Amino acid sequence: MERELEFIHCQNCKELIPKTRKKGSIFCSPKCGWTYRNNKKALIRARLRAAEPALYKNYDIVKYLYRNNRCDISEETAQELGIDFNAHMGMVDLDNENGTTTFRLFEYTLTITPLKRIIIKKIGDECT
């Protein structure tokens, strides 16, 4: 009884390749693998470059507020100042019990409370 060959598509060029190759192989050649990974890295770098201006604008606003001891502001004030809530370094903590969300922005954290207040803290420091 002959076994029927199975084929998969190369992740880069979509060429059909036999499934009899090395286990887990998803590229038809090393060149296709390198091209795929390089294109993926280029896309990530482009997204980061696009996000940089918003990150630095947020950073400048938060740094100004912190230095002027305005560590507890309303969400409306933050929006008026131009803070983009989609531009941050990553979510640090989502506390469902208290209803707070904490984001990291370089050396600062921004905690959004259920009362729509934003508390700014410097990592390793407390607002005076």
Image (tube, helix red, strand yellow):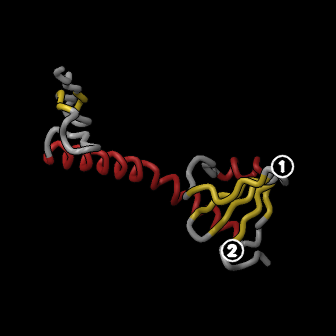
User: Residue 100 in the image: x percent, y percent?
Assistant: 78, 53
Label 1 CA crowd tier, 10 Å (few <14, some 14–19, many 20+): few
Q: CA distance from mark 2 to mark 1?
A: 25 Å
Label 2 CA crowd tier, 10 Å (few <14, some 14–19, many 20+): few
| Residue on which disc 2 sits | 67
Q: Quadrant of the C terminus?
A: bottom right
Above or below, 63 against 115 in this view is below
User: Residue 20 in the image: x percent, y percent?
Assistant: 19, 36
Above or below, 10 against 58 in this view is above
In front: 117, or 7?
7
Q: Secondary structure at mark 2?
A: helix
User: Residue 39 in the image: x percent, y percent?
Assistant: 26, 45
Which of pointers 2 and 1 indicates the residue nearer the eye? 1
In front: 37, or 17?
17
Q: Quadrant of the N terminus?
A: top left
Q: Is residue 29 left or right of residue 98?
A: left
- Quadrant of residue 12 in the image? top left
Q: Residue at x 58, y 57 (%)?
A: 58
Q: Secondary structure at mark 1?
A: loop
Looking at the image, which residue sits at the far front?
1
- Quadrant of residue 111 in the image? bottom right
Count the marks: 2
Q: Residue at x 71, y 52 (%)?
A: 78
Residue type of the residue flagged with mark 1 = Pro
Above or below, 96 against 12 in this view is below
Above or below, 26 against 71 in this view is above
N-terminal of the pair, mark 2 or mark 1, is 2
| Residue on which disc 1 sits | 114
Residue type of the residue flagged with mark 2 = Arg
User: Residue 51 in the image: x percent, y percent?
Assistant: 46, 50
